[in-house]
Image (cartoon, rainbow, N blue to C red):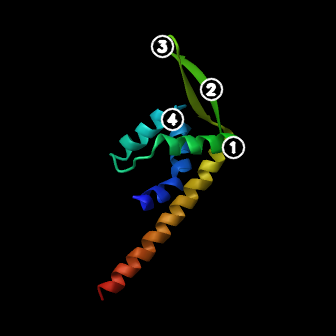
Amino acid sequence: MAIKNYFMNGTTELLVLSLLKNQDRYVYEIVKEIENLSDGLLEISQNTVYTSTYKLESDEMISEYSKLVGKKRTRVYYHIEPKGLEYLKQLKTIYHDTTQGINKIIDAIDKNEHK
């Protein structure tokens, strides 16, 4: 399913930022939330999410902090920054415009095939 993975890589930042908009999260939690909220239709690997978080952090869209969970375990949480909120708005607009455009093209082609 290389095609599916290629398509998902382009939307990972959108999904990560969308999830961080409401609360800080760690990578495994982001992966599970994507799977749960999509009713299992979307499965993104932890590696893909880590790649996105590294890029978003380097671009100052998100920040990270460590939190002790249990006696010895530390978990890294990610937090969306104001720059990330602005970027998220742009990504949502691009996503909506792109999906609407694709749907219009597919619908037009399907209608022409049935004539």
Residue 10 to residue 19: above or below: below
* Number of other residues with Cα within 10 Å of mark 1, as a class: few under 14, some 14 to 19, many 20 or more: few
Return the residue at label 3: 70
Residue 57 to residue 102: above or below: above
The amino acid sitting under disc 1 is Lys
Residue 62 to residue 112: above or below: above
Secondary structure of the residue carrying tag 2 is: strand
Secondary structure of the residue carrying tag 1 is: helix
The amino acid sitting under disc 3 is Gly
Residue 60 appears in view: no
Return the residue at label 4: 27
In x, y percent, where is residue 42? 39, 49
**Disc with the residue nearer the chain's start (4 vs 2):** 4
State the mark number for residue 65: 2
Residue at x-position 42% and y-position 38%? 33
For this orientation, the residue located farthest to the front is: 2
Q: Nearer the viewer, residue 109 or 50?
A: 50
* Number of other residues with Cα within 10 Å of mark 2, as a class: few under 14, some 14 to 19, many 20 or more: few
In x, y percent, where is residue 91? 58, 54
**Gap between marks 1 and 2, in whole Å?**
17 Å
CB within 8 Å, label 2 to label 3: no
* Number of other residues with Cα within 10 Å of mark 4, as a class: few under 14, some 14 to 19, many 20 or more: many
**Gap between marks 3 and 1, in whole Å?**
32 Å
**Disc with the residue nearer the chain's start (4 vs 1):** 4
State the mark number for residue 83: 1
Residue at x-position 57% and y-position 20%? 67
The amino acid sitting under disc 4 is Val
* Number of other residues with Cα within 10 Å of mark 3, as a class: few under 14, some 14 to 19, many 20 or more: few
**Disc with the residue nearer the chain's start (3 vs 4):** 4
